[in-house]
Image (spheres, rainbow, N blue to C red):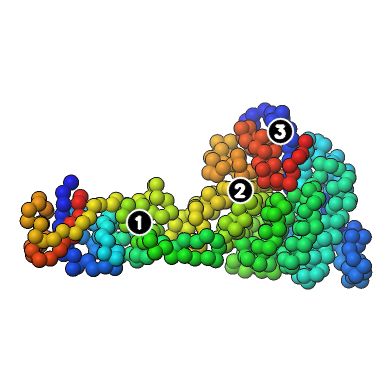
Amino acid sequence: MTDHVVCALSELPPGKAKRVMIGTRAIAVFNVDGKLSAIADRCPHEGASLSQGQVGGVIVSDRPGEYRVRTDMKMVRCPWHGWEFDMDTGKSWCDPARMKTRSFGVKICPGATLEEGSYSLEVFSVSLQDEYVVVTV
Amino acid sequence: MKDAPPRDTAAISGLIDADIHPRNPQRHDLAPHASAYWAEMFEYRSIDRLEMMSQPQSIGLNQHAEGAQANATPQDIARLHLDPQGISAGILNVMSGAHAAYDPYLAAALCEATNRWLAADWLGQDSRLHAAALVPFVNPDAAVQEINRLAPDRRFVSVLTPLMGEKPLGRREYWPIYRAMTEHGFALAIHPGSIYRHAPTQSGFLSYRVEEAALAPQAFASQLASLVAEGVFTEFPDLRVVLLDSGLSWLPALMWRMTKDWKGIRLEVPWIKEAPSDIITRHVRMGTQAADLPQDADQIARVLGQFDAANMLIHASDFPRPHATGAGVPDWLPQPLHAAVARDTARATFVRLEGLE
Ligand code: FES
């Protein structure tokens, strides 16, 4: 497993998602209220880019006609047919056991620490003052 | 079917038949069970034969060899059907114009009088006979009252509605009916027939009966989709729905399609918390006649393998229609399913039958 610096944190502010490439692998990185997550950017249904999807609180209901938006749990909705995926685990809401996309570890690293580790840094140069998004593949 | 295995009739003791049609009641049958006002109106307004256009009884088509005599009295049904078939319990389904009256009070009067006629002239004559209650779906308050009135009489085991009525069956207007039904353990039976408040297809009225007969599965599919999506089974987890004379090969396609679409559109109906196919499997049962199946036993097995046939099929002969032939369960039914289809699933579905010998 290798850590890959995929972008500066400033490129992925809260509420945004980004498609990044690590080699030939497309990964969707999300920043939900400051918490990062990364899943394969390919919907297991028909392959849409999940980084283009809307992120929203999971909608639940106890009875017909009653609706609640869960504030403690958000999911991304595929832009093509609306299947929902947990951005931490890659599991779908409707069929979590069978229908899921891969998830990856992701963290924020200060630029100063990146020089010391063995990071894959193909894409850009790192400034010591900034913070970076690092995905483990 | 070629090479049908020998029938093991021992496996079908306690046979239940969920779809037997008595003749329609006429004015002289109903008047003694109606209020003075309605008895007079039946006479004055010539409310008599009560044939549904969609379920004609007086024309010669599709009739038993004995014609109108086949289901004229409980004795005829016993002689021609219950005795030779070895049926322990049969459910009478009246498909009459009582389902179609638009006047909410006439509808209530016709339904109640029909139920009273069934109780007096049929159920009291043969202990094997049970019945579906008729209730006025155009008048849900009266329907609830009628269900509550009948609740102590356990010979009424279900509520019958024609396939194509006023509105999709999942609509909330009908929920008081379902609430009363589930409180007392009535199943909901849906039988082909339209009251023609709407065209029988989404694209309009048809010219020929062959079209309408062939397209009935679309209406069944619409009703199931409505019941599932509106959350009827979420609200009434004990409700069981029995599709009669529905065919069955279309059901797996609906289950698959609805489950597929639910995955992406569930935000609109978040009370649907599990795959519609699972909901349908738990709540919906289908009668065995008339079955739209291939001839070949292997192909039949493949169709039946697409849904939980052991728990979803109920023997329903559709007597006196001529496809009600043979002894007990239909010839095409594979032997391992006999006991479930002949008896066990019906008992689990028509829970008011409990205590049956
Ligand atoms: S491609 Fe994602 S739901 Fe169809």
**Residue in the image at 73% along x and 56% along y:** B160
The residue under label 3 is B12
Callout 2 amino acid:
Leu
Disc 2 target residue? B248
Mark number, residue B301: none
Task: Decide if residue B51 is in sight here.
Answer: no
- What amino acid is labelled 3 in the image? Ile
Q: Is residue B182 above or below residue B137?
A: above
Residue depicted at x 74% and y 62%: B144
**Do the residues marked 3 and 2 share a common chain?**
yes
Question: Which quadrant would the C terminus of chain B be assigned to in this image?
Answer: top right
Q: Type of residue at label 1?
A: Asp
Secondary structure at numbered mark 3: helix
Question: Label 3 to label 2, Cα distance in Å?
Answer: 22 Å
What is the x, y in percent for residue A128?
8, 63
Image coordinates of residue B226 in percent, x first then y, are 58, 61
A65 horizontally vs B194: left or right: left
Of marks 3 and 2, the one in the foreground: 3
Which one is in front in this view, the residue at disc 1 or the one at disc 2? 1
Disc 3: host chain: B
Q: Badge 3, how many Cα within 10 Å: few under 14, some, many 20+? A: many
Q: CA distance from mark 1 to mark 2?
A: 37 Å
User: Label 2 marks which chain's residue?
Assistant: B
In the picture shown, does residue B344 fall above or below A37?
Answer: above
* Nearer to the camera, B333 or B240: B240
According to the image, label 1 marks what residue? Answer: A86
Residue B136, quarter of picture: bottom right
Image position, residue B190 (x, y; %): 68, 55
